[in-house]
Amino acid sequence: MPSILKENRIQNFGPNCILSASFQSIAGIEDEGWTITGSPVIVSTPFGRGMQFDRTVPDYITIPSSPELDFVVAGEMSIEVLLKLNLVGQNQEIVSKRNGANGYMFIIRSTNVIRMSFPWGGYVDSTTPLQVGIWYHIEMTWNNGAILFYVNGAPDGGGAGVGYTDERTADINIARAIGWGPLSADVEFINMYSNAESAADVLARYNNVAGLGTNP
């Protein structure tokens, strides 16, 4: 199943995990009440199975908004993703929750770095460009306006002082072009947490993933 029930989320990822999307089957995603647009396919990965999103279709998934997925302005959150880019040099949205001038977008920039972007123009970028065809464990943490990025368990830049206009009604979109561009990638999972995970937490999650496959 793509979304792990609350009791299993707590067991597998800790009490702060509020969303866990692991793409095991098309039918499982539809059973969750999530909407599939386009024709994404399930593919084998070094870690099990994932979903391949094709930006030329484009393929994306919409998850209905719920109070559990809302974040407060003066608060915390983290987004964790395991993916392999099938295209670089283009703006590509991984996760977005946006309604007009409110919300956020977690994206890959055309310069191939990770960006946490906000509709009115505020943003923070990571440091190291990602490459095509390589699996990456990436995580972003937000702590009252301070953003940190991690790539394969290691810190990779960040910034502070970015404002966030809360969005409590918009759906969450995976791989959809809301303001930048659709995603072209194989995605093993996307997890979201209600806290800003520590560097030790992120490294532990990366080590757990790395033990499942040969890359990252």
Image (cartoon, grey):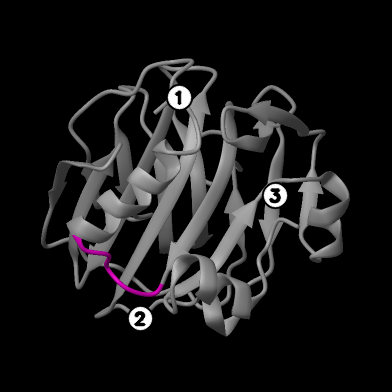
Q: Position of residue 79 (x, y in %)?
A: 40, 56
What is the three-letter code of the residue carrying label 1?
A: Thr
Q: What residue sits right under mark 1 in the picture?
A: 214
What is the three-letter code of the residue carrying label 3?
A: Ile
Q: What residue sits right under mark 2 in the picture?
A: 72
Q: What residue sits right under mark 3 in the picture?
A: 61
Q: Position of residue 72 (x, y in %)?
A: 35, 81
Q: Position of residue 118 (x, y in %)?
A: 34, 55
Range covered by the magenta-colored residues: 194-198
- Residue positioned 76% across, 57% down in the render: 1
Instruction: Looking at the picture, tell me which residue is in the foreground, 106 or 164.
Output: 106
Q: Is residue 156 left or right of residue 192?
A: left
Neighbor class of circle 3 (other Cα within 10 Å; few <14, some 14-19, many 20+) is many
N-term mark: 1 or 2:
2
Neighbor class of circle 1 (other Cα within 10 Å; few <14, some 14-19, many 20+) is few
Which image quadrant: the C terminus? top left
1 or 2: mark nearer the eye: 1
Local SS, label 1: loop
Exactly how many numbered labels are in the figure? 3
Q: Is residue 69 magenta?
A: no
Q: Is residue 177 in view?
A: no
How far apart, in angstroms, are the residues tagged by discs 2 and 3? 24 Å
Q: Is residue 15 above or below residue 47?
A: below
How far apart, in angstroms, are the residues tagged by discs 1 and 2? 38 Å
Neighbor class of circle 2 (other Cα within 10 Å; few <14, some 14-19, many 20+) is some
What is the three-letter code of the residue carrying label 2?
A: Val
Q: Is residue 68 above or below residue 97?
A: below
